[in-house]
Structures are given as C-alpha cells and as structure tokens.
Amino acid sequence: MLEGIRAVIFDLDGTLADSMWMWPKIDIEYLNRFQIQVPAGLHEAIEGMSFTETADYFRTAFFLPKTTEEIKQDWMDMAYDKYANEVPLKPGASEFLDELKQRSIKTGIATSNGRGLVEAVMHAQHLDDRIDAVRTACEVAKGKPSPDIYLKVSEDLRVAPKECLVFEDISMGILAGKNAGMKVCAVEDAFSMGQIEKKKALADYYILNYHDVLNNTYEHLR
C-alpha cells in the first residue's frame, strides 16, 4: 500500500480518532435547546460538510436564532472536553504514525472539523510532532466531496497528489480523496457501518484498523 507513497493524509473523525460516537448526542442535545427533534436523514445531509458549512446548514434548515459563528462556538464548547480527554486514536494508529516517520513519509490531517477540536485531540494524543500539516475544510472553498482540502494539504506537504495516500471513513471523504487524484484507503468505523459496500466500491483499499496496514492484512479492492 505504501509503495511509491511520499505522503499519507488522514481524515480525523472516525478515521484517525475514534470520535464520531459523540456527534449524534451533541446534535440531539443542541436541537433540544430549541425544542427541535433531530430529523431522519440529518447525518446523510451534512456528510462531508465543513464545520462552517454544517453550522450554516443548521442555522438555515432549523431557523435557529443564532449566527453561524455562534453555533460553531456552541459546538466547540460542548465537544472540547471530550476531544481533550475522552477521544482515543483508532487501534494501531499510533504505531502506524511511528512507522510512517521511520520511513520518512510525510503526514497530514484534512478534516471537516473545527481547528480548536483538532488541536485538542492532537495535544492529548501527542500528535504535534507526528503530523506535518493540518488543514480544516473551513480553510478551503468547499468541503468534501470536493478535492479542495486534500489538494491543499498535499500542497502544504509539497507532495504531488499521485504520491499521496488518503485514509477516510465516510463515502464523501473517499470521493474527496479520489477527486484529488489520490489513492484512498477506507477505514471501518461504527458510525458508517451502513456504508461499507459503498465505501468499498469507491476506495482502493479497506481496513478494519491500522494493524491491517502494518501486518499487510488489508483488503486490496482494485
């Protein structure tokens, strides 16, 4: 999988960090503040959106009496402690990052999350010296499945897209990596179990966790 690869770029939530479990709870709690129930299909509607795009979607779809920036700050306040204290890396991720460093393969994070939460989990999991570049989708024109964020990280790393390998847990993220001209490895996550076949149809590889990469037991899809 790493043959000819000079940079590995990770999505954060559900891919590098085991954090997707908290967001449905936050959505329920937040909308309950306005006496609104979470509608069916919400998470499919916002999949791949940047933190800013998602907040703007909530503001307009639910007619919230808040600005987009206020909604983002509310979510940051609700999630920060969990990212700093309760969010672990996915199994094998730490060892894989160490392996990449030993091979002198550059590393990046391309996330739809807010930068404050990214920094919280990076500090907590000692990623600051193991990740070479970080970009959020709020810093580019469009969120996933547009390739913007992956192209921006590859530019930061000064590595051509064709020499980059992406790890992603959701379909829109996989599409973003493929649209950027990169190889993509789909990562299993409890939050996206219903997407397994779709993810496999889009990605180049599939793993249950990062031990599969280290042990060469991953699924080669194409």
Image: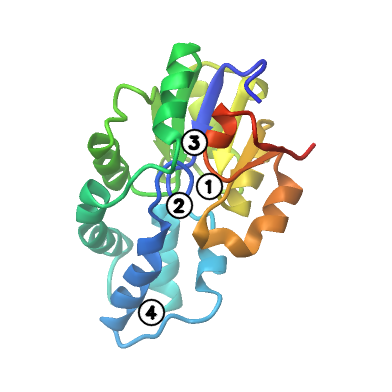
The image's mark for residue 63 is: 4
Give the residue type at disc 1: Lys
Whole-number angstrom distance, CA of label 4 to CA of label 3: 34 Å
Upstream in the sequence, badge 4 or badge 1?
4
Whole-number angstrom distance, CA of label 1 to CA of label 2: 8 Å
Q: Is residue 18 above or below residue 213?
A: below
Q: Is residue 155 above or below residue 21?
A: above
- Residue 41 on image: x %, y %: 56, 75
Q: Is residue 208 visible?
A: yes
Label 4 environment density (alpha carbons within 10 Å; few <14, some 14–19, many ≥20): few
Whole-number angstrom distance, CA of label 2 to CA of label 3: 15 Å
Label 3 environment density (alpha carbons within 10 Å; few <14, some 14–19, many ≥20): many
Give the residue type at disc 3: Phe
- Residue sitting at x 51%, y 68%: 43
Whole-number angstrom distance, CA of label 1 to CA of label 3: 18 Å
Q: Which label lies toward us, 1 or 2?
A: 2
Upstream in the sequence, badge 1 or badge 3?
3
Give the residue type at disc 2: Ser
Circle 1 sits on which residue? 142
Q: Which label lies toward us, 4 or 3?
A: 3
Are the two marked residues, 1 and 3, in contact with CB atoms closer than 8 angstroms?
Answer: no
Q: Is residue 146 visible?
A: no
- Residue 192 on image: x %, y %: 56, 60
User: Number of numbered discs present?
Assistant: 4
Upstream in the sequence, badge 1 or badge 2?
2
Give the side of residue 125 with respect to residue 140, left or right. Answer: left
Give the residue type at disc 4: Phe
Upstream in the sequence, badge 4 or badge 2?
2
- Residue 222 on image: x %, y %: 80, 36
